[in-house]
Image (cartoon, grey):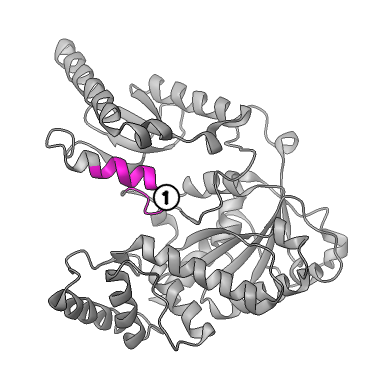
Amino acid sequence: MAQSSADNARSFGAKYVNTRQGTGPSPVDTLTEQRLPRKAVAGFVLGALQGSVLALGGIDSESLRVVLDAVEPDLCDRRALFARIAPGPTTVAIVEQVINLLAETARRLWPIWFTDVSFGGCRNDTLGRLAAGVIARSTAEEIAGLSPSWAAAAARLALDNCPPRVSGTLPAIELAQLAMAITRYGLVLVGDVSAARTGPNPTAVVHALEWIAQHLHGAVVALFPELPPNEPPFDRILYDARRVMGAGDAEPGIIEPDATGPADAGPWIAPWRGLPHPLSEIERRLAKALGADAELAPLFGFNQFINTIRGSRPKVDLLWTEGRLVVELDGYGSHGNRAAFMYDRHRDYELTLSGYTVLRLANDEIAQDIEKAIEKIRDLVNLCRTQAVSEV
C-alpha cells in the first residue's frame, strides 16, 4: 500500500511538473530560471520524492494553502501539513519543535487517525482504552512501519486529550509514528522558514529539515517569500528549487486566489474534503451546532467541490446540494486583502451564474453568536425551498 501511494504521489507531481531531473545545470545557473506556474504548484509539493527537501519561493503560506485546498484528495493520497518554523539555537531544538507540532496536530485530528481509522466509539474509560488498543494494534498490522505498542500508547494519551508523545520513544521513531497518525500515505511538511532563516543559527534550520525529511516517510518543502542566495547554508537545499510565477507572469484573464500572508501561525492540513476541517475551530464549532439541529443536520456537507458553468471547480466550505445553497466562512486574516476580496467575488459570480445562492458568514460571527449564524442558514434554507416550490 505504501509503495502504490508513493507511485501515486510521483505520478501526480509528474502530471504538472518534472520536479526531480537529477541532471542539468547547477543551482547557480538555474535558480533564476526555474519558474513554476501556479497550476504546477500542487504537483510540485504533493509530488515531492520521499526523503527530499525542496525549496519553494515566491508564494506565502496562505496562498499555498488555497492552491492545495483546490486539489481533490482522490487525485493524490498525500497530505501537506503547514507549519511556521521558529528560529532555534540548535538542530535538536528545531526537530523538537516539529515533533511537538506533529503531536499537537494528531491530538486535534483525534478520533480520526491514519487517514481513515476512527476511534470515535472509544470512551475514556477502561473498556474504551482496551478498545482503542485493539484498534491501534489492528491498524499496525495494515500499515508498514507502524509500531503497535506506540500506536496503543499514543491512543491512550489522545483519549485523555493529551498530545500523543509517548515517553521513551526515540526522536526519529516518534517523528515517523506521528506522521503516520496524521496520514498513512506520506506526509509533506511545508515549513515556512522565513523567520528561522534570519535566526541565530540558520545552519541548524537546514540540518533539521534534512534530518526530518530522512525520517518522516514523506518529504519537506521549505517555503520562502523569496528564495535565498545560493550560498551556505541554504545552498544545500536549493537544488531543484522553484519560484512561483507572480501576477505579472500569470496568464491574462486568470484571477489568482492570492493572499498577503498566513491567516495564523497554527498548523493546517491540505487538501481536505467531505468533513469539517479538524484544525479549524470555526468549522468544528459550526458542524457541532448544525449536527444538533434536526432540520439542518441532514442537509449540509463540508468542504465540497462544485462544477460551475464557467468550467471552474471551486471548493466551498458548506454545501446543501439539493437546495443549491453555499455557505462560505470568512476569516479576516485570509480574506482581508484586495486579491482575496476580488477572488471571493469572482467565485460568488460563478456560483450565482450556476444557480447557487451564496451566504457568507464571518468567523467572528460564528465565534460570538453561533445561534444567529444558524438562523441565517435556516432562513436561506427556507428561502431556497420557497423558490423551488414556486418554480414547479
Q: Nearer the viewer, residue 363 or 295?
A: 363
Residue 254 seen in the current view: no
Q: Nearer the viewer, residue 257 or 367?
A: 367
Q: Residue at x 39, y 32 (%)?
A: 328
Dot 1 lies on which element?
A: loop
Name of the residue lying farthest toward the top: 390
Is 270 placed left or right of 44 in the picture? Answer: left
Q: Quadrant of residue 87?
A: bottom right
| Residue 33 horizontal/vertical position (percent) | 81, 53
| Residue 282 horizontal/vertical position (percent) | 37, 42
Q: Residue at x 56, y 69 (%)?
A: 98
**In the picture shown, does residue 348 fall above or below 89?**
above
| Residue 254 horizontal/vertical position (percent) | 61, 31
**In the picture shown, does residue 271 fall above or below 97?**
above
Magenta stretch: helix, strand or loop mostly: helix
Q: Nearer the viewer, residue 97 or 324?
A: 97
Is 211 placed left or right of 161 in the picture? Answer: right
Q: Nearer the viewer, residue 310 or 178?
A: 178
Is 64 placed left or right of 222 in the picture? Answer: left
Which part of the image, by quadrant, shows the C terminus? top left
Q: Which residues are magenta?
A: 276-288
Which part of the image, by quadrant, shows the N terminus? bottom left
Per the image, is 107 magenta? no
Residue tagged 1 = 72
Q: Residue at x 54, y 48 (%)?
A: 65
Tag count: 1
